[in-house]
Image (cartoon, rainbow, N blue to C red):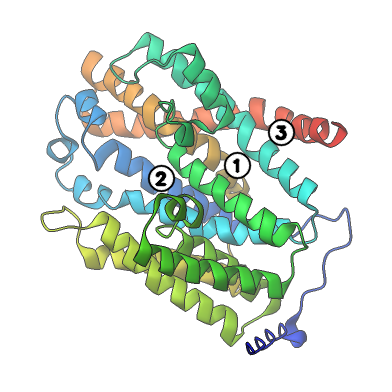
């Protein structure tokens, strides 16, 4: 006869947060907005100065020749993705608390799709104007890209960065079905974190396409770590959530090092581990309440710019670099600065004229459907 599993410990009652009354917005953690933009800028730096490929054609040579010193740091900018995933775990757990599955679904769709559709239109237009930067796709491929399901269907991607959105969507689906649908509680989040971590470890050992698709062993530790850090933030310090964070950090260092370092790689494995550690530590500082002093109003704007900036910076940035540097002869450093600032400006326009009006309308339309 199998032994019954011991019950999960209750969250620390002495620090249990009381949910805000309906209709009252949650206090915004402004430091998270700043961290999100920092992660996006890390990825941007990698795409402009830390890798080869198409950007080399835009600079007319490999970026490590254009920026000999900067490129040595920029090669680590790809770790901004792992930073994003830790933040995402924290934010999704926070935003789903007390919500129904329908509310969760509508909020995610309204958050992700308006800016994404605008970015698809902009980059498709750029591909027609300058095919050397972005290869144009057929109409059927563009329409599939609108669904955000192009990667599992094997359709060419319009946005290079959208592979991370597919990772996020799978995380949302897992969390929605296993936690949000029955109702978000401390115990359910802990159980979800524990089971997903074990599944990720086992799938790493056994392999298989389905395990890779559903369990995502390379990325699970970051999401799980973020979820557990939100439990720390909401319920206070406890051995169980901090233990989940510690295990996620260890597994995250391992997966990042395994994926981003090999003999002859331009990256140092200890720097990779350090940056993963800093990502966890930064979100842990928010969870522990050590960043309350970061209450500058501009951080709200920084958070609002992050998603549209992340969507458009890669291909459109390469487009701008090619025009400014190769066509107009602007020196490398001014080209880099103007391109980054230009992409931030475009992100503000997308937020102001696409996300702000269309997001709420889409959410209301889905609610009335």
Q: Is residue 342 left or right of residue 330?
A: right
- Which of the marked residues, 2 or 3, is nearer the chain's N terminus? 2
Query: Which numbered disc, 1 or 3, marks the residue closer to the eye?
Result: 3
* Residue labelled with disc 2: 41
Rendered residue at 74%/82% (across/down): 15
Q: Secondary structure at mark 1?
A: helix
Q: Quadrant of residue 277?
A: bottom left
Q: Is residue 29 visible?
A: no
Q: Residue reaching furthest front?
A: 1
Query: Which numbered disc, 2 or 3, marks the residue closer to the eye?
Result: 3
Q: Is residue 73 left or right of residue 296?
A: left
Q: Is residue 249 visible?
A: yes
Of residues 147 and 234, the one nearer the viewer is: 147
Q: Secondary structure at mark 2?
A: helix
Q: Is residue 13 left or right of residue 320?
A: right
Crowd band around label 3 with a 10 angstrom C-alpha radius: few (<14), some (14–19), many (20+)? many
* Residue labelled with disc 1: 304
Q: Quadrant of residue 234?
A: bottom right
- Which of the marked residues, 2 or 1, is nearer the chain's N terminus? 2
CA gap, disc 1 and disc 3: 13 Å
* Residue labelled with disc 3: 359
- Vertical order, 84 against 3 (above or below): above
Rendered residue at 50%/74% (across/down): 245
């Amino acid at each position: 006869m199998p032994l019954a599993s011991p019950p999960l410990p209750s969250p620390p009652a002495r620090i249990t947060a009381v949910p805000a009354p309906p209709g009252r917005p949650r206090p915004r953690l402004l430091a998270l907005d700043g961290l999100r933009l920092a992660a996006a800028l890390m990825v941007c730096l990698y795409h402009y100065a830390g890798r080869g490929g198409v950007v080399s054609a835009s600079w007319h040579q490999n970026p490590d020749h254009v920026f000999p010193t900067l490129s040595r740091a920029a090669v680590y900018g790809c770790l901004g993705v792992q930073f994003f995933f830790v933040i995402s775990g924290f934010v999704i757990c926070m935003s789903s608390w007390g919500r129904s599955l329908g509310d969760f679904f509508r909020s995610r769709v309204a958050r992700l799709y308006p800016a994404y559709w605008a970015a698809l239109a902009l980059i498709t237009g750029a591909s027609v104007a300058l095919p050397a930067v972005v290869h144009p796709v057929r109409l059927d491929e563009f329409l599939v890209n609108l669904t955000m399901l192009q990667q599992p269907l094997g359709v060419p991607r319009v946005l290079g960065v959208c592979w991370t959105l597919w990772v996020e969507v799978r995380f949302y689906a897992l969390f929605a079905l296993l936690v949000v649908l029955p109702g978000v509680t401390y115990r359910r989040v802990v159980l979800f974190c524990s089971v997903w971590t074990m599944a990720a470890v086992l799938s790493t050992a056994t392999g298989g396409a389905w395990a890779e698709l559903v369990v995502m062993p390379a990325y699970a530790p970051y999401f799980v770590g973020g979820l557990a850090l939100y439990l720390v933030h909401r319920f206070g310090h406890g051995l169980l959530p901090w233990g989940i964070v510690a295990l996620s950090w260890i597994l995250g260092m391992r997966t990042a090092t395994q994926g981003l370092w090999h003999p002859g790689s331009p990256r140092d494995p200890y720097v990779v581990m350090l940056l993963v550690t800093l990502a966890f530590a930064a979100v842990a500082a928010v969870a522990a309440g050590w960043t309350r002093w970061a209450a500058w109003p501009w951080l709200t704007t920084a958070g609002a710019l992050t998603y549209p900036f992340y969507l458009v910076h890669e291909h459109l940035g390469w487009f701008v670099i090619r025009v400014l540097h190769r066509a107009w002869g602007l020196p490398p450093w001014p080209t880099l600065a103007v391109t980054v600032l230009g992409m931030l400006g475009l992100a503000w326009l997308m937020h102001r004229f696409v996300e702000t009006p269309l997001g709420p309308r889409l959410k209301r339309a889905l609610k009335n459907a």
